[in-house]
Every structure is written in structure tokens, then in C-alpha cells.
Image (cartoon, grey):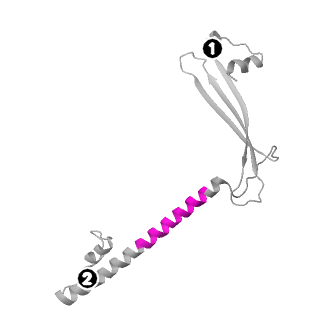
Amino acid sequence: MNIRQFLHNRNITFKAEDALIISKATLNFNLRTIHFSTASTDQKPECYLIKIEITFDNSRHSGQVFVRLNTLISYVNLCNGKVLQVGPYTADSILISIIDIAVLICCLASLLLCSRALIKAYLLQTETQRHFSRILGIELEWNDRWEFLNLCCKNFY
């Protein structure tokens, strides 16, 4: 249904030249929303009524139409209408669960590989320190020891 049919069904006549003399138009409508708490499944849904008023102000006829939006949100004690309960296993929930499991596996693999790299770096550091002290008779400084773990900072003493 287009706007002309809508206006004709409501017995409203509107001509194109009338648009030039309109200085203010207001559009009012209500929205009902239902909010489900994801924390618990036995909790009743919260219902809200949002009263919306959009005002188009062309009173200056300057080529700019000022738009004002007013909303009033109120809590509704009684939820009317149907609330569809979706089963626990939908295609979307299965796909999200598979993606979550894949991300978890990647994170665990990354943690394992990072831990392995840190352990190998520590073992290499101790072996290098032992080599320098036994063969060359030089003790490694802390700055040089941290280089093995890539944690070195110039002023990190």
C-alpha cells in the first residue's frame, strides 16, 4: 500500500500544491517492546510502551525542515499478545555454539603454544647463562636475560 492509497482509505485529500502551505506535521505512534532476561529462563518478560512523537516543522519555509523527536517510555504491568517460546535447539543457537567452541579451542591452543614458547625461552636462557658463566666466566646481566623472553625494556632494572 502506498501513501496515496493510505490517505484515500482514511478520506484525507492531499494535493501536491498543499505541501507548500503545510508548516507543521506531527506523526504519533506507539511501540510495545518485550524484554527477556537472559540470566534466568523462569522470569517473566518485562513489557514497555514507548510513545513516539515526530514533529516536522517547516514554519520558516527556509528550505530546512526541523525534525523533533519526543519519546516517553513507560513500564506496562500486563503483557498482552503472544510471546513465542523458541526451543533450545535452533539452527542459530547450534551455529553460535559451534563458533563459540571453535574460538575456545583456538584460545586454548594459543595459550598452550605461548606457554610452550615461554618455557623454551626460559630453558634457553638458563642454558646460555650456564654456558657464559662456565666457558667464558661472564655473568649475563638482567637486561640480557630478559631478551630471551622478549620482555626487555631499556629502563627495566
Q: Which residues are magenta?
A: 95-114
Q: Amino acid at mark 2?
A: Thr
Label 1 residue SS: helix
User: Most extreme residue toward the bottom, as rendered?
Assistant: 134
User: Most extreme residue toward the left, as rendered?
Assistant: 136
Magenta stretch: includes residue 145: no
Residue 27, numbered circle: none
Main secondary structure along the magenta-highlighted residues = helix
Viewport quadrant of the N terminus: top right
| Alpha-carbon span between mark 2 and mark 1 | 85 Å
Residue ID at (65%, 53%): 91
Quadrant of res 25: top right
Q: Amino acid at mark 1?
A: Ala
Viewport quadrant of the C terminus: bottom left
Q: Which residue is mark 2?
A: 128
Q: Answer few, some or many: residues within 10 Å of disc 2's Cα (few below 14, many 20 plus, some between 14 and 19).
A: some
Side of 16 relative to 130 (left or right): right
In-front residue for pair 28/94: 94
Residue ID at (70%, 55%): 37
Label 2 residue SS: helix
